[in-house]
Image (tube, grey):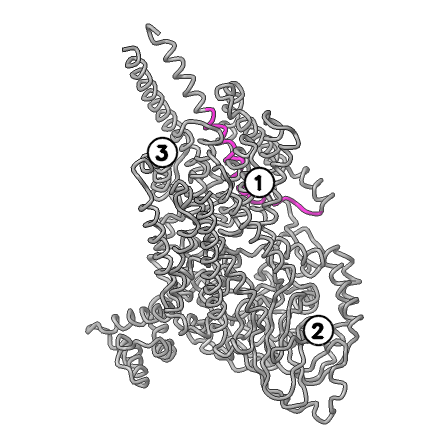
Amino acid sequence: MVMGNIRYNSSVHGFFIISLIAGLFGYWFAQQQLLFLSPDAFASYPKIYFFITILKCFFTIFVFFLLTYLLMRHFSRKKLGVLTVATAFFPLLFVYLHCPLYLICMFIIVVQLACLFCKWRAKDYSWLVTTYSVDLIALVLLLLLHLIFTSEFSPLHWKFSLITTTTEPIPILAPLYKSYAQAKQFAFSTMDYAEWAGILNPPITLASPLLQFLTLILDLPSINPVTFHMVLAAINFLLIIVGSFGCYLFLKYAAKIHAIYAFLGGYLMFFGVSPYLRMMQQADGGVFLSSYGVFPYCLLLLSLAFEKKNYLLSTWAGLALASQFFILTPHPEGIIYSVFFLGIYALGLMIFSPYSRWYQRVLLTAVTFFSFFLLTAYIVVPTFIDQYTGNMHTISHLNIGVSKLDDFKVFKCIFLIFTPLSLLLLWRNRESYPTYLSSLFFCLFLYAIFISTTNMHFNHIIMQFFHIGLHIDFPWRIGMYVCLSIFIIATICLDSLANHFMRLIIFLVPGK
Amino acid sequence: MKLLDYASLKIKQKILFNLFSLFLIFFIIQLFPFEPLRSFEMAEEGVNCPYYFTLQSLLARYPLLAADKANAKFIKQKLQKFENKMTNPFLPFTVVNHYKNPYFNNLAKLNLRSINFSNSDDEIIRAASKTAPIVDGFYLDKNINCISPLYNWGNPTRRVLRFNLNGLYDQLPNKYSQIMMASPPLWITGASPGYFILNQTETFDTRYMTGLPMLTALYVLPKNDFTNYGSFESPATWLYFNIDSLRDPIIRKMLNIGGIDIFTILTKDLKDKKIPNVFMLPTKINPLFGKNFKSFVNEESYGLVYFANNITYENSDDIESQERYIKHYFSHHDDVVDFRKKINILYHKLMQLKYKDDVILEFPKIFSNLDNSTRNQKKGEVSIHGIIAERAFFTTNCLQKNCLFVFNIGKAPGWHAFVNNTESNIMRANFAFMATEVPQGIATVWFIYAPTSKLISYFVSIFTLLIIFLMTGFKKSEIKI
């Protein structure tokens, strides 16, 4: 009881300390924002907006704090409390001593790592090794493979970052560039008066809070367009690594296949030699990368939520889907595809999950999409309101084109070979067969959509009824998800094949 | 013994499994044809044609450049690099004459011997401003071949040039100038004549066709062939338009009211299209790009901010009904003939404005007691302190009893105006732009874009995130994968 009280008190103290730090940092931030506008701005700026800026900053710091706390709590095996993590954020107040932000961040990280090392004992190290060594090796290998062979955005090309991202049209990148410049003026916004007649919440404009955050923290020269392209390439590269690793985690922990095959699946997710995946990197230059990169995490968390009947994991699946907005807001088409395709996968899980009641399955899916909606409300709601009230007009692409399917031949073969095989081999791991069946359902559904949307007549029917055509002038935008689903099925099958081969060997061993 | 046998069998099984897996993976990788990455080829192209960002464009970009130490450091590095080149004792005579001597002479005027001895950020920026044309001239002359393919879409140098477009101008009239770039009809990016209005099934991208309905209808598409193509990498707005439309008096008037300060036109288009001499205004274009472009300062432009001159009143209800109609037209693709008829009524009213800075204002009549004798007198001065993201800060000096301050940005719900710390009403000026009343004497004016929906949805998102983290962090049992 006494221990409980001490913990409770330290948590309260911890929250008080972090609130104080966040509030003071918020005040400094709001002040800097006005100083950049004009040295005289502070006196006449409406107080209510000044307070709102402080509040926004306060909550952002709080989110960072909680995220750090979650990580520290997990890796210290609940030995680190709120108070310790909150105190580690104390260097944020060094901004009043004109300390650069990158140094402050470094201080915070060093303090937190020091706390972690102090708490770790021998058995914690062995826990770390047994729990994470394989995953860490997979992550390092993925990093190396993408660094050397596969990624357009590899750090090896950063020296020529301006040239490697040439394929991205300037009108798409330009708002992002403006927000890069604005970050150094303490304005985390994409809005720009230079749009003149333009709308204020454009649904198509790229936005990247992560890019702005990195720019401010690393104190990058905001006037240098080369540095901007480098940061963008770094974010895209990060998305590739994170995406590949996410696919690996999905295959290993949700589909429960062997790590080697999971690794293969993870690498294939961004394998540069696949025509659609290459086009995604080269032709669209990263605009679709964020929705694609976070997609495996949505699959993983939703599968686990269904497996464990855990609503919190469902909200995390929604958070994973929403995280594309925090990293790099993709092209609206990318958002629509990722949400729609996750819906298909969730439908598969709802049909094939035997362990829960029907309303639980519906609720698990609903929680995911509801949390996604709430988390993205800050971008989606103003856009919808503008559109609904007629204060914004947008005209979507009106034409329909038929894509060439030649590039897809190799995937057709993989699909045709592995799909029947996967059906035969499902019994191997009964625990994860809802994931298998949902993946298969997902794969078949996507394949059907892909084929049908490349049909001219089908699209004309859609146009007749909805006045909106599906944009399939660029088939890789759907094609990459089709590739992913086929790779998932293929790796699951390979794992099963290998297992059967092993059983056969053991069966044939003399004396057994 | 049995246990050992079992263990060795398990190990053998594991080894076999891994070997088989590796073989399968190798086999699958062989199925894919490996193609070399294109970026290496592009990198080679980049090496052959090095890019250069003009100092001038960098300096023009941000009014408060010196306040950011990282930027000042970057500028200093650029100047140091140039100085290092100039210290070569075997420089050709022309380089010494054209670049080295003028550069150091200009530094001497600032009491500086070399940029290396300068430590203050302000000093670096002043030195850069003074020597920018010389440094830029040196690099651009050296790489002139890399600059030529301006309109070659996809060429790396084109991208660099787009970021360099401010280098076109020796000096912009002000940092917030709005620039329009004319091009032949085929080159109009995003929209071509009639596509949008006639609802043809042709492709254009949404980002070119999103906007505020009233402003788009009147100022962006006055004759069906404009596009609001805000190119954000420059400090000024770039709007691409059909060069033919320059002859049209309605379009010219609309551009003036909309505050387009500069027209930039390709020289060859000028020859072909025989633009009337009335447009041949003094040009300040950078001679390095002068071969390709002519730039005209539009002296009739209302500018980004101004005090209204003569005010004509228009019933708010009438404007709102027109706006409702336009919104309906954009969302439902109504009949274009009806649309044009309605729009022409508004054009007619705007064409009645005789003098520069004349304004059509919606009711209520706040200036009803305006003395007719002061109508064409100077109203006062407006200065822009800064416009960053959602915040625009101005000071005004109104010489009359009260003045109408116009901010030439489209009026949209969510804007708030504050005059001397008090919230002020925002009215529609010239049917689409924002205006507010300011009192006599010096006043501070803020325009802040903060719609309630955006604020509420922001807090909804961040609270959801906090709740998810709190629930995960403070639940009793940990989720195990």
Q: Which circle, 2 or 3, is nearer the viewer?
A: 3
Q: CA distance from mark 1 to mark 2?
A: 47 Å
Query: Would you say the magenta stretch is mainly helix, strand or loop?
Result: helix
The residue lying toward the viewer, choosing from B56 and A488, is A488
Q: Is the residue B473 above or below the residue A196 in the image?
A: above
Residue projecting furthest to the front: A2
Q: Which residue is mark 3?
A: A134
Q: Is residue B94 visible?
A: no
Q: Which mark is residue B428?
A: 2
Q: Secondary structure at mark 2?
A: strand
* A436 with respect to A164 (left or right): right
* Residue A97 picture quarter: bottom left
Relative placement, left or right, of A2 versus B366 is: left
Marks 1 and 2: which is nearer the front?
2
Provide residue A183's location: percent of width, then percent of height. Answer: 47, 63
- For mark 1, what is the residue? A403
Residue A68 shows up from this direction: yes
* Element at label 1: loop
